[in-house]
Image (spheres, coloured by chain):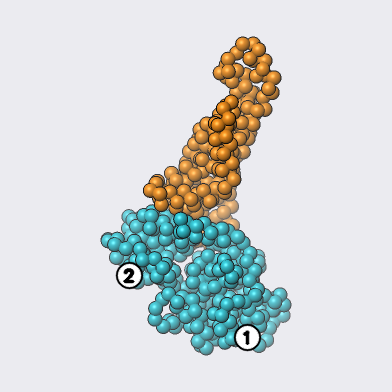
């Protein structure tokens, strides 16, 4: 029943929109903020940076239910994770204080939210793809991720992505895993569940033979649950970008400059250590090279 | 394209089967609520209050993840079908019951005064009048049920909405994709509405 309760609670949390998070809390983000840069250069009147500065907070489209990346702590009300902290640091850079407001975005609302100006940026494991680049501009990539495979301990016959052919594969709804499985094993039957805890429960209840998800999330799951086992290394490269209104080259360059700066200063690595690095062993990787 | 078709067919199948199941279960519950046995009436009332007062999404999650914990594991489609049918049955039961109640008590009394038995009273006096009056409320429930099948996508069923989300994940054209899906639901709902009007005229 415990798992069930968690799944139910997560569903409800995910369903609640809004989640104003203007007050920074928690020691992790405080230590990061202490090192965070603040932009002091010229601001073009009427530009995105100008608007955000005048508003006094950064409007972010993102998730509340992505462990290690952007997860709302239901008790403290604090948003934690790699994407969440980057959002706070970007707000600090622009506004001078880490005031952000998270609007729940989903894969079907991200492009419209940017196009109509409801949010300033999308920070939501938003993989840069050619199809999407026709609709939105991307700063970054700010993180290189990869989809990996998890199975129930003791499962045989699944050692590489091609082995998924003909099998039933569980993936998170609307995650890059959907496409990853389709590309790696077109004959695999895909079953989607709304959240990571549901996917894990479904795998344990044999609703599928394998679970494909971002490696960092799977590592976190396996560290909490001994029934899970990771198979091999990540088999895709998913460059996550920060979504920006299509065609806003000035703001894209601004965010890219900021990403380069925090990459150089070591702040990016600190954010990684505080979030994904708590479950993935080893040193922080080098931040991905910024394209333009 | 096969994904679109799969999603559409699953939505249609889930809608038709769930509504058929809801009608059957709802009829049973409605009878429980009408019969002159206090215990059975109580059972019917409890059923309606428990099922309709908990959100369908919660039922779906409970059925999909809870039942396997107690050893009952059905395919996802049939799990979703069961949850939706049992949930909507509560609404169907209430629609049927209010239809029967809408027939004035004097009609039943008159039938009995004429010497008709309980069964004859129901068959020739109460039900023909009640049937006409429940057509539109049932059509409302059927349309709501059509839309509610989209929730099955959250628990692994590839319905029309889930298929659209998968397609949108690659195309990044949500307005286009979801307008298309919306039109599909509109056609289905309009079909139900049309069927209800025809049925109502027949029963009149």
Q: Which numbered marker is on residue A232?
A: 2
**Label 2: few (<14), some or many (≥20) within 10 Å?**
few
Residue A111 appears in view: no
- Residue furthest to the left in view is A157
Q: Which residue is mark 1?
A: A38
Q: Picture coordinates of residue B19 (x, y %)?
A: 52, 37
Q: Picture coordinates of residue B86 (x, y %)?
A: 51, 40
Tag count in the figure? 2
Spatial CA distance of label 1 from label 2 is 41 Å
Q: Residue at x 62, y 81 (%)?
A: A92
Q: Chain of mark 2?
A: A
**Secondary-structure class at tag 2:** loop
Q: Earlier in the sequence, mark 1 or mark 2?
A: 1
The chain in cyan = A
**Label 1: few (<14), some or many (≥20) within 10 Å?**
some
Q: Residue at x 60, y 13 (%)?
A: B116
Q: Residue at x 62, y 22 (%)?
A: B126
Report which quarter residue A57 is drawn in. Answer: bottom right
Asked if B23 appears above or below A222 in the picture, the reply is: above
User: What quarter of the picture does the C terminus of chain B occupy?
Assistant: top right
The chain in orange = B
Q: Chain of mark 1?
A: A
Report which quarter residue A138 is drawn in. Answer: bottom right
Residue in the foreground of this view, choosing between B36 and A120:
B36
Residue in the foreground of this view, choosing between B155 and A106:
B155
Residue in the foreground of this view, choosing between A32 and A190:
A32
Q: Residue at x 57, y 39 (%)?
A: B46
Q: Picture coordinates of residue B198 (x, y %)?
A: 60, 29
**Secondary-structure class at tag 1:** loop
């Amino acid at each position: 029943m415990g798992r069930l309760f968690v799944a139910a609670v997560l569903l409800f949390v995910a369903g609640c929109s809004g989640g104003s998070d203007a007050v920074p809390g928690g020691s992790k983000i405080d230590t990061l903020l202490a090192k965070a840069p603040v932009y002091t250069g010229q601001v073009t009147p009427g530009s995105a940076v100008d608007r955000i500065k005048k508003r006094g907070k950064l409007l972010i489209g993102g998730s509340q239910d992505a462990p290690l990346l952007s997860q709302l702590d239901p008790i403290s009300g604090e948003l934690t994770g790699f994407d969440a902290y980057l959002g706070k640091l970007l707000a600090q850079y622009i506004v001078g204080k880490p005031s952000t407001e998270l609007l729940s975005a989903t894969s079907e609302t991200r492009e419209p939210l940017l196009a109509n100006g409801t949010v300033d940026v999308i920070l939501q494991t938003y993989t840069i793809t050619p199809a999407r680049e026709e609709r939105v501009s991307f700063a970054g990539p700010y993180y290189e991720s990869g989809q990996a495979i998890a199975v129930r301990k003791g499962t045989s016959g699944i050692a590489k992505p091609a082995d998924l052919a003909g099998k039933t594969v569980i993936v998170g709804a609307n995650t890059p895993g959907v496409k990853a499985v389709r590309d790696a094993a077109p004959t695999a039957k895909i079953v989607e569940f709304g959240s990571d805890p549901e996917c894990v429960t479904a795998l344990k209840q044999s609703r599928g033979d394998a679970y494909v998800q971002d490696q960092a999330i799977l590592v976190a799951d396996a560290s909490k649950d001994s029934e899970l086992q990771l198979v091999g290394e990540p088999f895709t490269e998913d460059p996550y970008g920060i979504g920006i209104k299509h065609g806003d080259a000035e703001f894209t360059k601004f965010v890219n400059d900021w990403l380069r700066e925090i990459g150089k200063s070591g702040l990016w690595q600190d954010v990684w250590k505080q979030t994904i690095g708590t479950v993935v062993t080893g040193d922080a990787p080098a931040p991905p090279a910024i394209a333009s | 394209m096969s994904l679109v078709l799969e999603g559409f067919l699953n939505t249609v199948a889930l809608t038709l089967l769930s509504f058929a199941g809801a009608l059957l279960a709802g009829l049973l519950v409605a009878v429980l609520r009408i019969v002159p046995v206090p215990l059975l009436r109580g059972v019917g009332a409890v059923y309606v209050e428990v099922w309709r007062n908990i959100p369908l999404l919660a039922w779906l999650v409970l059925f999909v993840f809870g039942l396997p914990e107690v050893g009952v594991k059905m395919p996802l489609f049939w799990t979703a079908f069961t949850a939706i049918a049992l949930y909507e049955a509560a609404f169907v039961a209430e629609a049927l019951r209010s239809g029967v109640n809408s027939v004035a008590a004097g009609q039943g009394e008159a039938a009995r005064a004429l010497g008709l038995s309980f069964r004859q009273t129901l068959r020739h006096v109460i039900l023909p009048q009640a049937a006409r009056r429940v057509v539109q409320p049932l059509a409302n429930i059927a349309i709501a049920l059509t839309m509610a099948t989209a929730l099955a996508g959250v628990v692994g069923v590839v319905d029309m909405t889930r298929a659209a989300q998968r397609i949108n994940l690659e195309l990044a054209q949500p307005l286009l994709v979801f307008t298309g899906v919306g039109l599909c639901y509109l056609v289905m709902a309009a079909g139900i509405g049309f069927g209800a009007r025809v049925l109502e005229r027949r029963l009149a």
